[in-house]
Amino acid sequence: MKHTFLANEVSTLAKRTSPTFVLTLELDHHPRMFSVITDELEICRVIYNTVLGEYLKRDKQ
């Protein structure tokens, strides 16, 4: 199973002076491990979005 992770632009606050890279990894398919990683990435996504939302709210004030 092949997964590609793209460096994603989060906001327009970042300068566009650095290049964007693509990392492609070949992963062995272990359903249990894949499930754990998926859950952890979802938790990190929620935390990141919460922190970013709070930052943008405070920055607006």
Image (tube, rainbow, N blue to C red):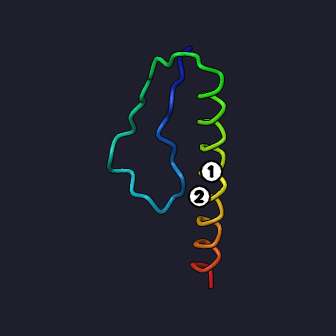
Q: Provide the secondary structure element on which disc 1 rests.
A: helix
- The furthest residue to the bottom: 61
- Which disc number belongs to residue 22? none
User: Is residue 3 shown above or below 60?
Assistant: above
Q: Provide the secondary structure element on which disc 2 rests.
A: helix
| Residue 15 on image: x %, y % | 39, 57
Disc 2: which residue: 48
User: Is residue 36 shown above or below 24?
Assistant: below
User: Is residue 15 shown above or below 26?
Assistant: below
Q: Is residue 6 left or right of residue 30?
A: left
Q: Is residue 38 left or right of residue 7?
A: right
Q: Residues within 10 Å of mark 1 (few under 14, many from 20)?
A: few
Please give the name of the residue rendered at 61% of the width and 28% of the height, measured from the top-left corner: 34
Please give the name of the residue rendered at 49% of the width and 34% of the height, measured from the top-left corner: 6
Would you identify the image quadrant in which residue 11 lies?
A: bottom right
Q: Nearer the viewer, residue 21 or 48?
A: 48
User: Is residue 44 shown above or below 30?
Assistant: below
Quadrant occupied by the C terminus: bottom right
Identity of the amino acid at label 1?
Arg
Disc 1: which residue: 45
Circle 2/circle 1 CB separation < 8 Å: yes
| Residue 58 on image: x %, y % | 60, 80
Identity of the amino acid at label 2?
Tyr
Please give the name of the residue rendered at 59% of the width and 64% of the height, measured from the top-left corner: 52
| Residue 29 on image: x %, y % | 58, 16
Q: Nearer the viewer, residue 22 or 32?
A: 32
Mark 2 vs mark 1, CA separation in Å: 5 Å
